[in-house]
Amino acid sequence: MSSFSPPQLADIGPDPCPEAVIALEKRLEDYLPPDQVALVRKAYEMGARAHEGQTRKSGEAYITHPVAVAGILADLRLDAETLCAAILHDALEDTPLPRSEIEAGFSPTVAELVDGVTKLDKLQFRDRQEAAAESFRKMMLAMARDLRVILIKLADRLHNMRTLDAMAVDARRRIARETLEIYAPIAQRLGMNKIKAELQDLGFRALYPYRHAVISKRIASQPVMRREALVTIEAQIAQRLAQEGLRNHLVSRVKAPWSIYTKMRQENKSLEQVLDVFGFRIVVPTVMQCYHALGAVHSIYKPLDARFRDFIAIPKANGYQSLHTVLFGPYGAPVEVQIRTEDMDLVAERGIAAHWVYKNAGAGGSAAQARAQDWVRNLMVTQQNAGSSLEFLENVKVDLFPDEVYLFTPKGDILALPRNATALDFAYAVHTDVGNHAVAARVDKKLGPLRTKLASGQSVEIITAPSATPGPQWLEFVVSSKARTAIRHFLKRLEHEDAVDLGHRMLDRALEVMDSSLDRIPAERIEQILAEMRHRRLEELLADIALGNRMPAQVARLMVHGQDELPLSSAPLTQGSTERIMISGSERGVLSFAACCHPIPGDEIMGYLSAGKGVVVHRADCPNVAEYRKFPERCVPMAWDRNVQGDYRVALRIEVENKPGVLAQVAAAVAESNSNIDSVEYRERDVTMSVMEFSIEVRHRKHLADVIRRIRRLGVVHGVQRL
């Protein structure tokens, strides 16, 4: 590790940004004691020494960027440790300054904060996307230890966006898209609306400069009539609030270009329709006065039905609190009004940075900070189960939806979930074990399936059963990242266990042909084979066999004879084995059933090992089996166990008279047999006869026979054939 001498101002040469540092110190003197201001100055001296000679794309001294980042955080009145880390946030990555020097000069906490925002450019990744995802994952892990990491990162991104014009066009677009997709939503999720709004505006301008220019010009050149209407409405609201004796701060709100653009796209509206909305914010001293002010504005203009939201009683997940109402305006245009207290207004603008009290959220820290900590803790559960950094990043994107539904548990607790969340998402939000064993839900005391979509204000109770487990189909209707990750994690574990069990049975069978067994193979031989095949444990090799990546006969030969003692004959060692592998249907994680012949319990079957897919089960009379038998080393003798579980797909060809209502009659007959219809297709049709192909689910051959018998009894049916 390189040595870094203690910084002395005399060694730095001319001060690279004296005006910026003086301005920063003046801002800090407003709320920090002199010794902490001196500490920030010391960080500047160390940073200036470390970055000496480095410049930005714009040609400015590099240290101007960290100082500007610290300035953004000073506006949020952050503590001295955060400001020191902000000034040094690029030093570990871009200079020889060692972490030990930061720890010695300041504290381990400052060094940890700097390390948290340091990107991973020095590691080797397959592509830029994976590098960005891994950097993001590391940042979120650091954020779990200390939320100030994300504050520094957001300030860093904001200053980079302010100075983006110096970058090449492709880089500008890539950084802008990343800002709009990840960093602006994170700022919103943490309640930092002021930073979110600027990130969105700068990102929109960089990504779509022409669209931004058109919308901005229209906002700036609003017609005189609209400006006069705005002033009139504002005067009427102010007069009414004064009559009620409410001390208030009333401001008109102008929609940002990005907000207008997204509304145009989502609601398919023209620019004129979106612009034709008046917005006002009323800030009053107390919560009770918020409701008083609401009554006052409702007495002037009538509210629009179903457009009132009480985020004071039920705050958003990011801590945001306010009353929202939309009124019928005097000029035919809607009037949007937000009403909140001064404290709520501060939290709405600054989010988790409002009333910053580090490690002391219980004694004065804001509710926004507590909610942010909960969100980050949930993210950590997600990242532990995510298969890759890219999967983790996608899950977090899902979690950053701005629209949420607020739901009640039976005890009256409130849970916030993403828009379009289902009862199953709710179950996983309560606890992973509740989700894994969920079978149904009571929504507002009415029984419903797990795929039921939820709406704000509903009360949800989850019904569980110890035997219930997640299935792959659950992934089709959950929307929250916690639910998706938990289901995937369970299925991966289940698939691995199934694969190990099936691989064990296949290897046992292959060894039995050679008059041996796994118990009789020396442990040293097994360890040697695992090392050659690059497996850490025997379970990994067994799973590889089940997935078709290793042939059981070849592994058996290696175990019995060794690499140097293989018999000259290369004939597959499957002949002479009378034992079949029995399957119960519970192995679906590694078994698949061929679509060409749809085997069901009761059929004579065989398995065929396909690399990557594992064992594909076919009917013994399947037309493709003759071709597969040319590769006997891949053929696996199989049979159904006595106790078979689940439903199995089967295809039927049904000839019917071409009359109205025939399909309904056949469908009713299938339903009466307790079978589900997956799909129906018309294959042939003429004036008198039609041929339909049904894909249905049955439990076994006897069940199928019952379905066919019921269909044949119908007078309109002329023939039924299994495909």
Image (tube, rainbow, N blue to C red):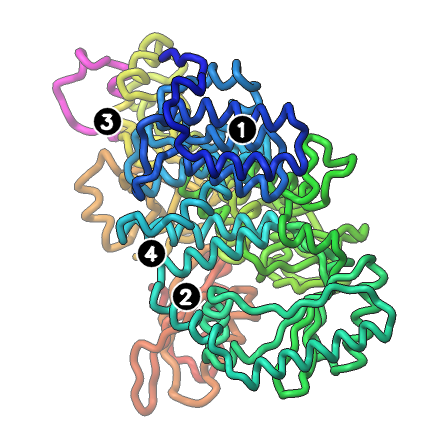
Q: Label 4, on which residue? A: 595
Q: Secondary structure at mark 4?
A: loop
Q: Of the residues shown, which amino acid type is indicated by label 4?
A: Ala
Residue 96, x across and y down, in percent? 36, 20
Which image quadrant for residue 455?
bottom right
Which image quadrant for residue 311?
bottom right
Dot placed on the residue nearer the N-terminal end, 1 or 3: 1
The residue lying toward the viewer, choosing from 153 and 315, is 153
Q: Label 3, on which residue? A: 573
Residue 432 visible at all? no
- Magenta-colored stretch includes residue 574: yes
Q: Label 1, on which residue? A: 84
- Residues packed near mark 3 inside 10 Å, few (<14), some (14 to 19) or many (20 plus): many
- Residues packed near mark 1 inside 10 Å, few (<14), some (14 to 19) or many (20 plus): many
Q: Of the residues shown, which amino acid type is indicated by label 1?
A: Cys
Q: CA distance from mark 4 to mark 2?
A: 11 Å
> Which mark, by number, is residue 667?
none
Dot placed on the residue nearer the N-terminal end, 4 or 1: 1
- Magenta-colored stretch includes residue 62: no
